[in-house]
């Protein structure tokens, strides 16, 4: 049976250790990175490719870049995007040249969104949302795929380095829109190296690993170009609140969108799969089955920054001193603050769109 990770699908990974083994990833080593962020410290970032070269660049203050893309097809994002931005922010704060591309051409070829609509959504919502989540616009280079002729010119050169069979082996499917979208992503990933060869890291969910593998395969076949193989780090998914193995964004009733009305969010949290026992007496005696509690997972990944505070909550819930209802009360309070900060951050960011640094093309 073929092993396929589908960057366009909605299936979740059940066994992350198996994914690391099957796809030749490196288990994430926390010791490699100074001042690791919350999701690194808590094992949410679990794997990568060639992360040692990025660690070396940080420690020795060598040039490197971090790059990510915005797919402007919806006026909502999800917690997976939040984790990508948090990792971009980490590398940005540790010396990386930062690039954010708006994948308007890919949105057109794979999702049927016009270039005009994609541009409007990116400027009205997506870029302000990234800024609200911590991206420093003063240190970030933005560009639209449709304006970057260097990227488009290289797409044709890169396309010659991959066969249809190889593409199908990576993606499981090879319709023309996906082929164009994927090879355009290769050119985007390498774009900062067109001017100067340097290491680069791409933070993504593991479902996007096919794009990294394709890029690395193409770079190996163009040794005369002296590109650095792109590095990557992968975060775990934020699971659906019902505990199912579907990406949370594919199940609206169990998915929290950003932004979303706080009353709607609280209802979802209150309905979430709990690790609490069937009766209060049993819960006090045995404590929570914390491993299956989706609200605690949400708090661990996103809502409690301080490790000591999270550990205190963990011990109280695990021992039975804290009930599931009390845990959800804390989550709802923290979520309300997060949503307020996020919404206010978007409004502030919209006022500063004039200071965005867009790459100028000839």
Image (spheres, rainbow, N blue to C red):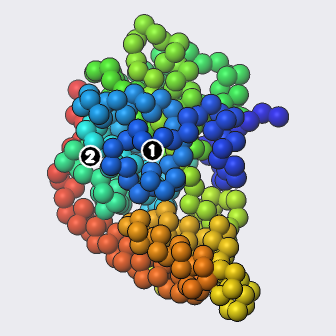
Is 304 left or right of 280, judged from the image as shown? left
Residue 118 badge: none
Find residue 294 and report its horizontal and vertical position in percent: 61, 70
Q: Which quarter of the figure is the N terminus placed in?
A: top right
Return the residue nearer the eye: 182 or 309: 309
Numbered-mark total = 2
Return the residue nearer the eye: 347 or 145: 347
Q: Residue at x 60, y 18 (%)?
A: 162
Labels 1, 2: front one: 1
Q: Which quarter of the figure is the C terminus placed in?
A: top left
Q: Which mark sits nearer the N-terminus, 1 or 2?
A: 1
Outermost right residue = 1
Residue 323 vertical position relative to residue 75 in the rendered view, above or below? below
Return the residue nearer the eye: 16 or 133: 16
Outermost left residue = 355
Crowd around label 2: few <14 · some 14–19 · many ≥20 (10 Å): some
Find residue 165 and report its horizontal and vertical position in percent: 71, 22
Secondary structure state at the residue bearing disc 1 = helix
Secondary structure state at the residue bearing disc 2 = helix
Find residue 108 and report its horizontal and vertical position in percent: 50, 43
**Quadrant in the picture for residue 302:** bottom left
Q: Residue at x 61, y 83 (%)?
A: 320
Residue at mark 2? 93
Is 261 left or right of 46, judged from the image as shown? left
Find residue 225 and report its horizontal and vertical position in percent: 40, 11
Residue at mark 1? 30
Q: Residue at x 31, y 30 (%)?
A: 57
């Amino acid at each position: 049976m073929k092993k396929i990770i589908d960057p366009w699908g909605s299936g979740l990974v059940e066994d992350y250790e198996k994914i690391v083994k099957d796809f030749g990833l490196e288990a994430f080593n926390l010791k490699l990175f100074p001042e690791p962020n919350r999701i690194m410290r808590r094992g949410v970032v679990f794997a990568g490719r060639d992360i040692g070269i990025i660690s070396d660049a940080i420690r020795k203050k060598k040039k490197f870049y971090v790059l990510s893309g915005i797919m402007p097809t919806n006026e909502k994002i999800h917690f997976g995007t939040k984790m990508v931005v948090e990792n971009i922010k980490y590398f940005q704060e540790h010396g990386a040249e930062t690039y954010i591309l708006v994948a308007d051409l890919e949105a057109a070829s794979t999702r049927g969104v016009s270039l005009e609509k994609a541009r409007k959504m990116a400027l009205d919502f997506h870029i302000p949302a990234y800024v609200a989540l911590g991206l420093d616009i003063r240190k970030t280079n933005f560009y639209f795929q449709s304006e970057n002729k260097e990227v488009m010119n290289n797409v044709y050169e890169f396309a010659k380095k991959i066969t249809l069979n190889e593409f199908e082996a990576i993606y499981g499917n090879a319709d023309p829109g996906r082929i164009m979208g994927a090879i355009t992503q290769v050119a985007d990933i390498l774009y900062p190296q067109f001017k100067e060869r340097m290491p680069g890291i791409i933070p993504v969910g593991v479902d996007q690993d096919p794009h990294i593998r394709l890029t690395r395969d193409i770079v190996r076949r163009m040794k005369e170009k002296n590109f650095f193989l792109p590095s990557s780090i992968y975060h775990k998914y934020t699971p659906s609140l019902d505990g199912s193995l579907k990406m949370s964004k594919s199940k609206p009733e169990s998915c929290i969108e950003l932004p979303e009305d706080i009353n709607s969010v609280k209802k979802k949290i209150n309905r979430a799969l709990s690790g609490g026992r069937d009766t209060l007496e049993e819960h006090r005696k045995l404590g929570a089955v914390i491993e299956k509690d989706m609200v605690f997972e949400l708090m661990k990944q996103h809502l409690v920054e301080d490790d000591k505070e999270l550990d205190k909550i963990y011990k109280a819930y695990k021992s039975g001193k804290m009930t599931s209802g009390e845990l959800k009360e804390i989550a709802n309070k923290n979520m309300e603050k997060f949503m307020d900060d996020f919404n206010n951050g978007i409004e502030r960011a919209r006022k500063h769109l004039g200071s965005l640094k867009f790459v100028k093309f000839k």
